[in-house]
Image (tube, rainbow, N blue to C red):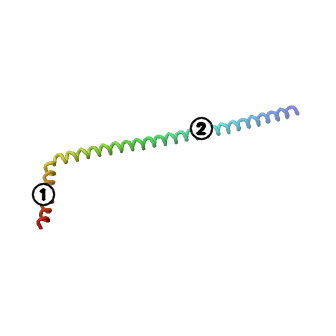
Amino acid sequence: MKQIIEEVLRAEEKVAAMLRQARDKASEIGRSADKDISERMNDARQKGLEMARAAVEDAKKEAERIGQEKLEQADKEKDALLNNNRDAIDHLVDNICKVILTTECDKDAK
């Protein structure tokens, strides 16, 4: 009987030790999983930030390119407007000069 009780006690001790090991292993697995999840989330966050920065940089470059194109287009349109209306502009300048000269001559005559 004593031997049976001792065997039961030893079996209980083994089971208790196995349960402690299982709990320790489960805790370690949980900590490892938490660490892995945290690292993956940080990596994903970092990649997201990098993608956002790249998208903003691309948008800035595209806006600068479009702005430059618009400036060049406006400059070409200005040149074309001046060239197409050269005679009218010259005539207007001549008229303005005549008015100024006439006004000055009228002042001098008085």
**Could you say whether the residue bearing mark 1 is in a helix, strand or loop?**
helix
Left/right placement of residue 14 relative to residue 38 reads right
**Could you say whether the residue bearing mark 2 is in a helix, strand or loop?**
helix
Q: Kindly identify which numbered label has been placed on residue 36.
A: 2
Where is residue 41 shown, x and y percent of the image? Answer: 55, 41
Where is residue 32 shown, x and y percent of the image? Answer: 63, 37
Of the numbered discs 2 and 1, the one sitting upstream in the chain is 2
Name the kind of residue labelled 2 in the image.
Answer: Asp
> Of the residues tagged 2 and 1, which is closer to the observer?
1
Assign the C terminus to one quadrant of the image. Answer: bottom left
Left/right placement of residue 6 relative to residue 31 reads right
* Label 2 – label 1 distance at C-alpha: 87 Å
Where is residue 98 shown, x and y percent of the image? Answer: 12, 57
Q: Is residue 105 above or below residue 33?
A: below
In the rendered image, which quarter is residue 36 located in?
Answer: top right
Q: Residue at x 21, y 45 (%)?
A: 79
Is disc 2 in contact with disc 1, using a CB cutoff of under 8 Å?
A: no
Residue occupied by mark 1: 98
Where is residue 35 shown, x and y percent of the image? Answer: 61, 39
Viewer-proximal residue, 67 or 38? 67
In the rendered image, which quarter is residue 15 located in?
Answer: top right
Q: Residue at x 48, y 40 (%)?
A: 50
Viewer-proximal residue, 39 or 99? 99
Name the kind of residue labelled 1 in the image.
Answer: Lys
Query: Label 1 crowding class (10 Å Cα cut-off): few <14, some 14-19, many 20+?
Result: few
Viewer-proximal residue, 106 or 13? 106
Query: Label 2 crowding class (10 Å Cα cut-off): few <14, some 14-19, many 20+?
Result: few
Q: Residue at x 12, y 62 (%)?
A: 105
